[in-house]
Amino acid sequence: MGLEHDDWKQRYSRRVTDAASAVRTIGRGHHVFIGSGAAEPQALVAAMCERGNELSDTELIHILTLGIAPYSDCRFVGSFRHNALFIGANVRGAVAAGRADYTPVFLSEIPRLFRSRRLALDVALIQVGPPDDHGFCSFGVSVDVVKSAAECADLVLAEVNSRMPRTLGDSFIHVSQINKLVPVDAPLPESLPPDPDEVAVEIGRHVAQLVDNGSTIQVGIGMIPNAVLRHLHGKKDLGVHTEMFSDGVIDLIESGTINCSKKTLLPGKAVTSFCMGTRRLYDYVHDNPLFEFRGVEFTNDPLQIAANKKMVAINAALEIDLTGQVCADSIGVSFHSGIGGQVDFIRGAARSEGGKPIIAMRSTAKGDAVSRIVPHLKEGAGVVTSRGDVHFVVTEYGVADLWGRSVRDRALALISVAHPKFREELLADAKRHHLLYDDQMLPAADYPDEWETVGVLRDGGSLVIRPVRATDERLLRDMFYDCSEETIHSRFFKSVKAAPHPKLQRWVNVDYTHEMALGGFVQDGEVERLVGMGHYIVDPATGLGEIDFMVQDAYQNRGVGTLLLQHLMKVARARGLKGFTADVLAQNTRMLHLLHKSGREMKSTLEERVYHLEFRLG
């Protein structure tokens, strides 16, 4: 700035005033920006509203704020009109009633609206911390769009709050750039969602399973994000690049789970544009060099986001249709929130090396009366995230992987993670609109993910073992056609040339009680492949399970069958089965060897070159 130390102090003292005097610079028809989140300048807002009868057609522009919004009251119609770039709870009623406007925009692009003067700002009302020895004030807990607004407005009126944390990064404004300074000493508004309920805990568990060690995460505020953060304990070397965060990250930092050491963009820094939470959070970020606060034109730029390897973006939705269209800003024709940073981060994570874009939501609303997974979005509902952008959708019932999948595969995957009470209705509607096969079976209601495990193959490779699902049909088809005629004949006792949908869906649709099928899966780059399957069906007369196995030729003699049998025995014992029976062709020496080395006493009879085997589980 070229300013001497004493010079800025003199300028500061000349610009100090009270809130009522500062807002006299606001005139009729002005476009006025109001600071964001917990940094809303509430004294200036209150003083401006006191002048309401002197003003007319004054447009008030902001994203989410935690503080007061009296200008949205009916009594100020004609004086003020709010333009919401993201709709918060304090202005939602005004937008719904038509007393306020909503501008849909990606959060990353709001600074360009200001700088291009497409959304010109006459005045910016902001809140900052006290100046340092060089005359720079920190924007504190909200840099987001506040910094660009302050740089673009003709006049900047700032509350200088002694309780505002001094955050670091690209988060400063010099007092010479502020026209009026209003000293205040006021606590920042606090916000902390309630403890996660049972549904949120399950969603958090499923999401956390998608987060690998060394990932960089984006997660917001709310019950589900809090649940996700709690389930991340035990992960290693996580980083943070997010638009905002709350108290939940503190425990992960203090436990060492988050250290930002593996980040590929700004390693060692937790990057954010704003934070909202409790006083504990505000004290924690104060003068803390771990945190790098920047404007949303950086934090939400998909190219910057994608520069983080293994970027995991976790966002919410209000509704999703069976083709994968995500509505996140409206409930039918009623606007609820905004586009925000969802698309910025979904697209950034999708382009990250090893990245995972995730939509996490409850399967129902209104006390389980309404499904959030629907055949069609409600009339008037907005598509925030398109079909092509959606990758993972997570509910309390599991994970639907949609990217690169056909509409048929998507519909089945989403029905599989919908609330069980709505699955039959969703299935019928999907069939009616030819999204699914006419004979498609209803996916089982209770997928037993407690039986998911990882085994080690003889060559040291990993084999994921889990119960098969209806959505594994495509993987089973590929495995079938990768098997030799000999392997197929050994499994089915005859030559089988084709595996059409009616057959395949019977093999992957099991009830997990009277019938169980475990798949052995390997990761081939970004692709999951099914390389083996073990299956049993219970004979109610004997309490024994008849078992069968099929292992792809390239994975035979590598321990796949052994691992599947061992795990199938654990499942069967837990389910109360007395033992297993199996019919094996005499020439199928691999299967005979597998069963005989199970460690159980085997009863064996041979008839027409088929061995009938029986052994007890104990």
Image (spheres, rainbow, N blue to C red):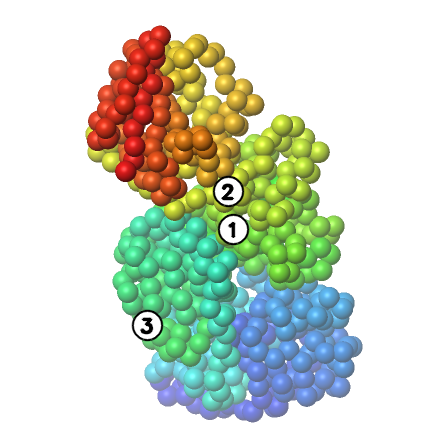
* 262 or 108: nearer the viewer: 262
The quarter of the displayed image where residue 299 is located:
bottom left
Three-letter residue code for mark 2: Ala
Residues at marks 3 and 2, CA–CA distance in whole angstroms: 38 Å
The 10 Å Cα crowd at callout 3, few under 14, some 14 to 19, many 20 or more, is few
User: In what quadrant of the picture does the C terminus appear?
Assistant: top left
Q: Is residue 494 visible?
A: yes
- Marks 1 and 2 sit apart, C-alpha to C-alpha, by 9 Å
Residue 77: x %, y % from top left: 77, 77
Which SS class for mark 1? Answer: strand
Whether residues under marks 1 and 2 lie with C-beta atoms below 8 angstroms apart, the answer is yes
- In the rendered view, would you say 61 is above or below 261? below
Q: Which mark is residue 288?
A: 3
Disc 3 to disc 1, C-alpha distance: 35 Å
| Residue 537, horizontal then vertical, whole percent | 44, 30
- Residue matched to label 2: 400
Decide: is 170 above or below 177: above
Q: Residue at x 35, y 23 (%)?
A: 582
Q: Secondary structure at mark 2?
A: strand
Residue 220's mark?
A: none
The disc labelled 1 sits on which kind of residue?
A: Thr
Relative image position of residue 562 (x, y in whole percent): 27, 29
Q: Nearer the viewer, residue 69 or 222?
A: 222
Seen in the image, is 149 located left or right of residue 304? right
Give 590 or 65, whichever is nearer the viewer. Answer: 590
Q: Which residue is mark 1?
A: 395
For the point 41% across and 45% down, which residue is it? 449
Mark toward the start of the polypeptide (3 vs 2): 3
| Quadrant location, the N terminus | bottom left
Q: Nearer the viewer, mark 3 or mark 1?
A: 1
